[in-house]
Amino acid sequence: MDAALFLRDDLLRSTGQRIWGLTFTLYPDGKFNIEYDYNKPEGYEETDEVITGDEINASLDEVMNKRDGD
């Protein structure tokens, strides 16, 4: 998984294009093939909004409090 994330980040940095899928095939003879998918998933909306850790924790706390109150 770390290698796939590295490839994703490195391709974005070096080409300016984001990959949305990656298929890695390893053959019995040790050769391999990597295929990238540059198609954005249908319905995905990119935003510059950033959610902070504090906002996430506040939302999770709210969910937990509602669950515990039921």
Image (spheres, rainbow, N blue to C red):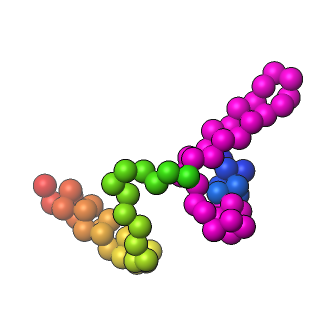
**Which residue is pictured at 72% across the width and 50% down the height?**
3
The residue sitting at the top extreme is 28
Inspect this view and state whether residue 2 appears. no
**Which residue is pictured at 43% across the width and 77% down the height?**
48
Q: Is residue 12 above or below residue 3?
A: below
Of 1 and 8, nearer the camera is 8
Of 24 and 69, nearer the camera is 24
The residue sitting at the right extreme is 29
Q: Residue 1: horizontal and vertical position, in percent?
A: 65, 47
**Which residue is pictured at 46% across the width and 54% down the height?**
40
Horizontal arrangement in the rendering, residue 1 relative to residue 43 (left or right): right
Dividing the image into 4 quarters, which one contains the C terminus?
Answer: bottom left
Please give the range of residues in magenta. 9-37
Q: Is residue 5 magenta?
A: no
Q: Residue 62: horizontal and vertical position, in percent?
A: 25, 68
Q: How many marks?
A: 0
Q: Is residue 20 above or below residue 31?
A: below
Q: Is residue 11 above or below residue 47?
A: above
Q: Residue 42: horizontal and vertical position, in percent?
A: 37, 50
Q: Is residue 20 magenta?
A: yes
**Which residue is pictured at 68% across the width and 65% down the height?**
15
Q: Is residue 12 above or below residue 2?
A: below
Q: Residue 44: horizontal and vertical position, in percent?
A: 38, 57
Of 55 and 66, nearer the camera is 55
